[in-house]
Image: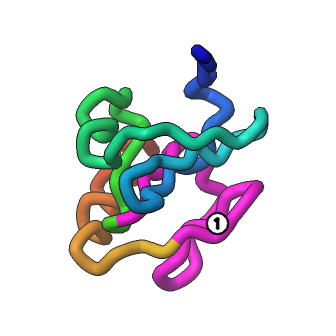
Amino acid sequence: MIHKVNLETIFSIEAQGNYTSFNSSERPSLWLLSLNKLEGLLPKHFLRVHRSYIVNLRKIQKIEGSSIITQAEKIPIGKSYREALQKAIQVAN
């Protein structure tokens, strides 16, 4: 079965073992695809912020300490990804 995912509805993408979960305003979906492979295929407004998460920068409502808050969830920020996130947010503003 083929299921299209509208990128603009995605809040975040989470690694779950060999699978990747798309957390969106549409129905959630689980794909047999690694986060590493997917990361290179996404547009620039998707950023890796943790070893297990990619976030849609357009869906960030706020950043509290070491967490990103979207409409749907709270996502941890990995220490090694913090600097890249700060730079991406500065560029976006």
Depth order, front residue of 32/89: 32
Which residue lies at the image location 62% right of the left edge and 22% below the top edge?
6
Total marks placed: 1
Please determine whether, in this image, residue 74 is positioned above or below residue 59: below
Depth order, front residue of 89/20: 20
72 drawn magenta: yes
65 drawn magenta: yes
Name the image quarter holding residue 44.
top left
Magenta-drawn segment: 52-75
Q: The residue under label 1 is which amino acid type?
A: Ile
Which residue lies at the image location 75% right of the left edge and 57% below the top edge?
72
Query: Which structural element holds mark 1?
Result: strand
Read off the residue under disc 1.
69
Q: Which quadrant does the N terminus fall into?
A: top right
Percent across and percent down for residue 8 are 61, 28
Q: Is residue 90 visible?
A: no
